[in-house]
Image (tube, helix red, strand yellow):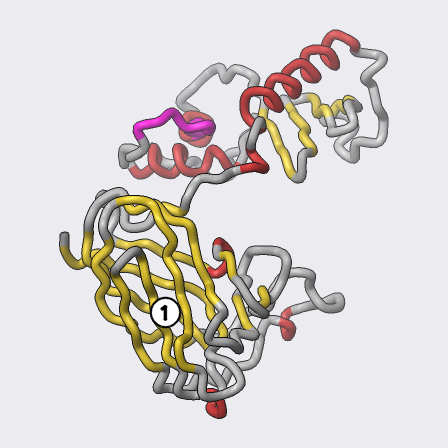
Amino acid sequence: AGIRAGRQVLEIGGAIDLLPTLADLAGIPVASVKDLDGKSLKPLLTGDTPTWPDRMIFSHWNKRVSVRTRQHRLDTNGELFDLSTDPGQRDDISEKHPEITSRLRKAVADFRENVLAGYDDDQRPFVVGHPDYRYTQIPARDAKWTGEIKRSNRFPNCSYLSNWTSVSDKIYWEVDVPADGTFEVEMQYACDRADLGATVELSFKDARIRRRISIANEVPERGMENDRSGARAESYVKNWATMKLGQIKLTAGRGELALTAPKIPGRAAADFRLLFLTRVGD
């Protein structure tokens, strides 16, 4: 069924509902074998349901948690607001409605204990080359590094690594390779012409590949032309070039996937954005 033009939906939803909703509308089964946090909003969009139970949607960032229902929102300070009459959230009504406040505070406490516990101490390795997927992206945002390498911004989105000036510097990821596989490896980079000629090496356990950067990619940061009020806090971006590093055989198991530059004839090896792995064999 289609969505009628002009239809208004008053029930609440969140980003967690996008996947189940779009999959349901397209008639595509969700591949995940685990339950999703979100729910399909298709019945609301098509008008196929006469009733819709109220729900709680949680938001969290930097250990701050809030929760809302269709009518109410409990903020991270424990203040309660009626969004139907006070969308600007200026009037705390927690003392006027102690039962609602208590119920939502209990829900937040449960969320902290059963969902957020350990969230900021995630030591899981980066999964590379899962057999169910042909492609793996390994971005700078998830890397660790040694030496004088710098990340373009403390915020991860769109960030890249620069100041790769020493052959002893290393960019690396703690990874888990679920199954043996052969992968074609590509790297996104930027490199000034004066620094051309660095050799980069990718290694995992006993496997390694090397390739010399032979094509310069002198590109400035961009995006500031779209800023309306001063410089943004997040990273600007570049028009990254892509070079093939070659094929590498990864054996199943955990270890360190490392990117080094054994030869740096110029001031720096390159600015690094991401690795892109394509499974080409077992």
Is 129 left or right of 44, judged from the image as shown? Answer: left
In front of the other: 146 or 60: 146
CA neighbours of label 1 inside 10 A, class few (<14), some (14 to 19), many (20+): many
Magenta part of the chain: 33-41
- Residue 84 position within the rendered picture, expressed as x and y whole percent measured from the top left: 72, 25
| Residue at (46% x, 79% y) in the render | 269
281 to 10, vertically: above or below: below
| Residue at (45% x, 29% y) in the render | 41
- Residue 105 position within the rendered picture, expressed as x and y whole percent measured from the top left: 70, 17
- Quadrant showing the N terminus: top left
- Residue position marked by numbered label 1 in the rendering: 187
Q: Residue furthest left?
A: 282
Kind of residue at badge 1: Met
Q: Is residue 174 magenta?
A: no
Rendering quarter of residue 118: top right
Q: Main secondary structure of the magenta part?
A: loop
